[in-house]
Amino acid sequence: MTNRPWSLAECIEHYTQSGIPALSVWRNVVDTDEGGIGIDQAVRLLRSSGLQVPALVRGGFFPAWEHAQREKALDVNRQCIDEAAALEADMLVLVVGAVPGMPLAEARKQVGDAIAALIPHAEACGVKLAVEPMHPMYAAEWSCIHRLREAREICESLKHPLVGMAVDVYHVWFDSDLEEEINAAGKQGFLFGYHINDWRVDTQKIQGERGLMGDGCIDLPAFQVMIDTAGFTGFHEVEVFSDKYWSGDQAAYLELILTRYRELMSAVAERLSAEDG
Amino acid sequence: MTNRPWSLAECIEHYTQSGIPALSVWRNVVDTDEGGIGIDQAVRLLRSSGLQVPALVRGGFFPAWEHAQREKALDVNRQCIDEAAALEADMLVLVVGAVPGMPLAEARKQVGDAIAALIPHAEACGVKLAVEPMHPMYAAEWSCIHRLREAREICESLKHPLVGMAVDVYHVWFDSDLEEEINAAGKQGFLFGYHINDWRVDTQKIQGERGLMGDGCIDLPAFQVMIDTAGFTGFHEVEVFSDKYWSGDQAAYLELILTRYRELMSAVAERLSAEDG
């Protein structure tokens, strides 16, 4: 999604050339209903590439007023789990959903119930389920889970090795419980995914204006140290939705992504060495 | 600000005709530097109108890298307090500020220190100071205080009858601690201000797209019941920043505001009566 203008085949070609070891896949790339190339073709491309697949993005959207709608959402998510398994993805990322007008406490309860109902299928397929806490500006329709604590509470209530969370810096950077919650999630083995990008200070729109690391105000080195300290050992996934970057040359953009990522890692190393000193 | 196209004199004329008892004033309306009419003229207009003034909006913007900048912010806020006193405003609303790149914990500490430093002047002038928790989408530059809990912790640490908070439904409606925090704030006498509006489900921009009560997805009757239960007895201030409404006829808009407000109050009465039954 970060190099959205590229096809999956183009992403694979450029990423492997650049030494990038992994690539998460969005459903619209796979699903023929959404103009995608189909799961079989996606599987063939990825298997032959040697790239790992951290996640299929995204399942979720569980809450609904009617029981039948909730059952339908579960069916869609079981299909997502099947696709994730076919792609040998480590996890399915869940944007859990929300319903305008439904009390958030009720929506959160429905999310917990839905994930519980998916566990048997996730077990059968060996696919992890990762709740992604989302920025409260998406609270109306996309997600009733915003804070890390809310995601942790769902993970704790289900207490299953396949249920954890995907932490995206964009959604949680301002959380006053950040360090405490990331530690708590790490200790309990809930840290499945980790997405990096930045919050641009000049943000005007709620979509399509994410920054690349260094474009914004998030203290990414501090975040990285927290995630490392909490024992996270998964991939560092650059996830940037940006109309600006999507409108430019993608190969040059990929170079910039790699440069910024290396700069971030150097800043992390400096900070750690300063702390040691 | 809700009827932004109107001058203060026009607001006063229409509000008194409509039986609205009070009007909060924004500094840009007063300050000649910002094209305002000047504090003396504003005071004259408001005194002769008989309208009450819940708040002068807004002071704050405390955190800064340099000591001298922080001192300058305190001076500006002392001037705000003077203006609030001249307007016989009950409170000065504080948008506390944030500095891109400054850790939010540090910014929050500076906010606490700044409000503490303002207390003597607030006492001398008899003006309350109301911290307004703001939506995290304003975390980069406008406010390091987002959750009700963060505002409560500042109020608790200062523990002064002139230090409390202004609760705006737009900024906190999604908070999973909403009821608990509003109760806690009410019990300790921290609930100074209460702003109502709505979150439009089709929100695309972070500014200028607020809804009028009923335009969006906030459970406003439930919020009102919480605020009432917590013992809030101040004004219900309609605060809507809306490019859409600002571009239309303001008199018709004021009628709509009053209609929507009455509908909300009816919904609250119905809910209370259902609970009693």
Image (cartoon, coloured by chain):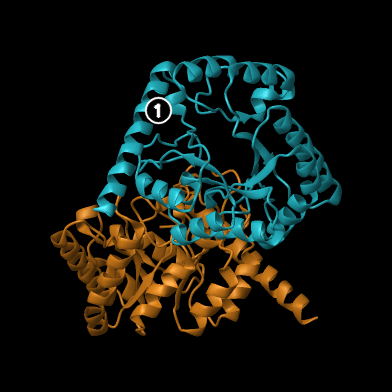
Chain colours: A orange, B cyan
- The chain carrying label 1 is B
Give coordinates of residue B241: x percent, y percent: 49, 33
Residue in the foreground of this view, choosing between A194 and B127: B127
Q: Residue at x 49, y 50 (%)?
A: B231
Give coordinates of residue B116: x percent, y percent: 76, 53
The relative height of residue A35 versus residue B244 in the rendered view (above or below) is below
Q: Residue at x 54, y 52 (%)?
A: B136
State the image quarter where residue A220 is shown.
Answer: bottom right
Residue in the foreground of this view, choosing between A263 and B110: B110
Determine whether, in the image, residue B98 is placed left or right of residue B273: right
Q: Residue at x 33, y 51 (%)?
A: A141
Q: Quadrant of the C terminus of chain A?
A: bottom right
Residue in the foreground of this view, choosing between B117 and B143: B117
Determine whether, in the image, residue A212 is placed left or right of residue A190: right
Q: Residue furthest front?
A: B276
State the image quarter where residue B56 is shown.
Answer: top right
State the image quarter where residue B23 is shown.
Answer: top right
- Which residue matches tag 1? B257
Give coordinates of residue A271: x percent, y percent: 72, 72
Residue A78, visible in the rendered structure: yes
Give coordinates of residue B219: x percent, y percent: 35, 48
Q: Quadrant of the N terminus of chain A?
A: bottom left
Amino acid type, label 1:
Ile
Determine whether, in the image, residue A275 is placed left or right of residue A204: right
The relative height of residue A252 versus residue A57 in the rendered view (above or below) is above
**Secondary structure of residue under mark 1:** helix
Q: Residue furthest left?
A: A68
Q: Classify mark 1: residues with Cα within 10 Å, few (<14), some (14-19) or many (20+).
A: some
